[in-house]
Image: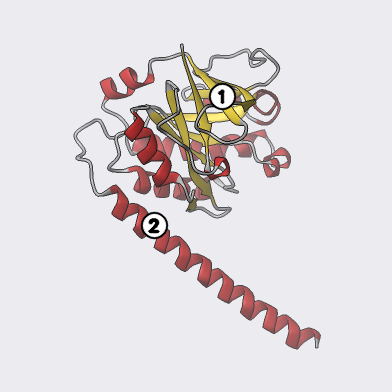
Amino acid sequence: MKTGFDLSSHQGAVNWGKVKSDFALIRAGWSWYNGGMNIDQRFAENVAGAQGAGIPWGVYLYAYDRSPEAAEVSAGRLADLLDGYQIPYPVAYDFEDNQYLSTGRERNTAICRAFLSTLQARGYYVMLYTYTNFAKGYLEMDRLGEYDLWIADYTGKVGWPGEYGIWQYTAAGRLTGVSGPVDLDRAYKDYPAIIQGAGLNGYGDREPGDCQSKLEALGKENAALREELARAEGKLAAIREVVIG
């Protein structure tokens, strides 16, 4: 068993030189309702920090996708970002947002399957993240059994009766080098050996590329899309003002 933590920009700047951990799971960002993604503002910084500290790392993307089609797009965007890295731990789809409490098990499961299968086809060791009650009440877990599971349960034990590879056991952990509370995790598989042995997550024939250039290009694309959305919302507001006025 290995003990690690997961983090995002919410933790602020991390003093990686002081961090003592077996692994880190780093947020790449979050997906959009209709597909695509925003990149966590500290993603590149955290990856560089983990690598510099010699801490094996994995990735997760927080899900907002509203359809299987959107999830496929988001998975492709995440793969575009990650291609060129060598990632020792899994790449997870963080599926827990409150919007999914009213969309039904079948549709939720279809969204997860679309994302995970698309990313898997791009050569990644994929994993689903959720919490025990969500897994029991809002997903058809038998249809997701082919994918590894990262389960959150803060009750002192895992209430999910099925198999899982990582347990997030608290959101109130403390870790030297990280400000404030942080999620802590336990991994029950030797993921680096499994992933490297299978040639996944960049350890196969694919040559590492210029990751920073890709990150910058995707960031510019995200900024352009946000500007386009702002312009569209401005035009809509103007139209409403004319019609109402």
Q: Nearer the viewer, mark 2 or mark 1?
A: 1
Q: Residue at x 48, y 66 (%)?
A: 225
Q: Kindly identify the amino acid type of the residue bearing the numbered disc 2.
A: Leu
Q: Residue furthest right?
A: 245
Q: Position of residue 102 (x, y in %)?
A: 73, 41
Q: CA distance from mark 2 to mark 1?
A: 30 Å
Q: Residue at x 42, y 20 (%)?
A: 22
Q: Point out which mark residue 48 bears.
A: none
Q: How many marks?
A: 2
Q: Residue at x 42, y 31 (%)?
A: 58
Q: Secondary structure at mark 2?
A: helix
Q: Position of residue 169 (x, y in %)?
A: 61, 20
Q: Nearer the viewer, residue 83 or 170?
A: 170
| Image quarter (top left, top right, bottom left or bottom right) of the C terminus | bottom right
Q: Position of residue 241 (x, y in %)?
A: 75, 84
Dots 2, 1 in contact, CB < 8 A? no
Residue 55 quadrant: top left
Q: Kindly identify the amino acid type of the residue bearing the numbered disc 1.
A: Leu
The crowding category of the residue bearing disc 1, from other C-alpha atoms within 10 Å (few below 14, some 14 to 19, many at least 20), is: many
Q: Position of residue 143 (x, y in %)?
A: 55, 26
Vertical placement of residue 132 versus 69, above or below: above
How is the model colour-coded? secondary structure
Say which residue label 1 marks: 184
Q: Residue at x 56, y 43 (%)?
A: 63
Say which residue label 2 marks: 218
Q: Nearer the viewer, residue 174 or 134?
A: 174
